[in-house]
Image (cartoon, rainbow, N blue to C red):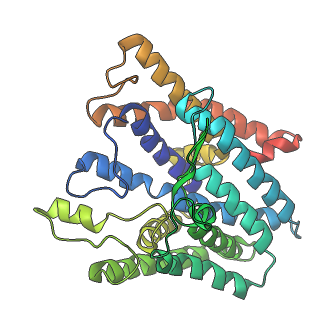
Amino acid sequence: MMRGLVMVVMLLDHVRETFYLHKQVADPMDAVTTDPAIFFSRLAAHFCAPMFVFLTGLSAWLYAHPASGGERPAGGFLAKRGLLLVFLEVTVVSFAWTGDLPMKTLYLQVIWVIGLSMLALAALHRLPRGVLWAVGLALVFGHNLLTPIDFKPGEAGYPLWTILHDRGLLVADGPVKVKVSYPLLPWIGVIVLGWLAGPLFGRGVEAAVRRGTFLRLGLGSLSLLLLLRGTNFYGETLPWVAQADGLRTAMSFLNYTKYPPSLDFLLLTLGGGFLGMAAWESARNALTRVFVTFGGAPMFYYVFHLLLLLVLQKLAVAAFGANHGARFGFDSMVPVWITWLALVPVLYPPCRAFANFKRTTTQGWARYF
């Protein structure tokens, strides 16, 4: 359900990037100049990648420890799925974002980083849990210390550091440019912590214990965030400053670096996600069933919704004309929100059909979607 929820929220941000691209959001978002409607829509989308990566690690543990009992090896599954995600990112997903053939620029984004994180987890998951805790916490809490390290294009360490920590052009020349949008290093820490959370979902763990643990984790994360962010002590390279009014001051306080995700960014998003996990432990209603359906077909949903948005952009240009360069765009965020809400029921039937197919088929490839 949580995975489906963040996927639905993600749709809002992708509708914005399809029909409001002419109003780009600076990264990090500028609390002084950004329209609050854009800012808070983007802020909601910030929760998606951290929770999805965390839940990927948790799902990997559940795969390795099925409800039927016993254990099964997860390394091969993680490695094959990770490689598939990287392949999909540089082919289908990159095309779905731009519609360009041949592609001019490959953007290595969230699917790429999830794939690489799964490859890393495939190599790490058999280490003792104490070692995994040290790795996960060190990467999440310590990677801000690496911010001063910098390599210029052409220097020996630039390609590796661009992949691990500093987003930038991996290939700047030639017929196809390659840009790393999601640096890898902190996401390895997040997926490892997700794996370590797996035993909370073991058969012998009571729901009340699980709920209480996530509640404490959420409150602890947000309390630490208030301490670190309130003092501008550590965890974010952009200090918050008082603005002309309370709203802009709040925007400055909530303006965190996503690429790579700062400690404050992860404390906010994972902390909020943990509170959601606690609050919705026993939630069972029509809305949660919708989220469960979406969450049961994550890769299908991701590819399908991007292709749908690409087609809708082309149809809008054909029907109404290009009003922002070669694209059609809305004049405010209101039609973005309306389009987002209208697309959720459109996406539901195909995702439900594929989720049912995945549960009933004996074809192994379906597990990877």
Using the rendered view, name the quadrant where residue 231 is placed. Answer: bottom left
Q: Is residue 29 visible?
A: yes
Q: In this image, 237 relative to 163: left or right? A: left
Using the rendered view, name the quadrant where residue 240 is placed. Answer: bottom left
**Residue 15 locus on image (x, y percent):** 43, 36
Between residues 13 and 223, which one lies in front from this camera angle? 13
Find the residue positioned furthest to the bottom.
130
**Residue 307 locus on image (x, y percent):** 58, 30
Between residues 238 and 230, which one lies in front from this camera angle? 238
Find the residue positioned furthest to the front.
154
Find the residue positioned furthest to the top.
319
Placement of the C terminus among the 4 image quadrants:
top right
**Residue 13 locus on image (x, y percent):** 43, 44
Residue shown at the point (69%, 59%) measured from the top left:
116
Using the rendered view, name the quadrant where residue 364 is placed. Answer: top right
Q: In this image, 132 relative to 286: left or right? A: right
On screen, 248 above or below 41? below
On screen, 217 above or below 269? below
Residue shown at the point (82%, 40%) measured from the top left:
360
On screen, 131 above or below 205? below
The number of discs equals: 0
On screen, 112 above or below 267? above
Between residues 52 and 280, which one lies in front from this camera angle? 52
**Residue 366 locus on image (x, y percent):** 80, 42
Q: Is residue 288 visible?
A: no
Residue shown at the point (54%, 66%) measured from the top left:
165
Residue shown at the point (37%, 36%) measured from the top left:
21
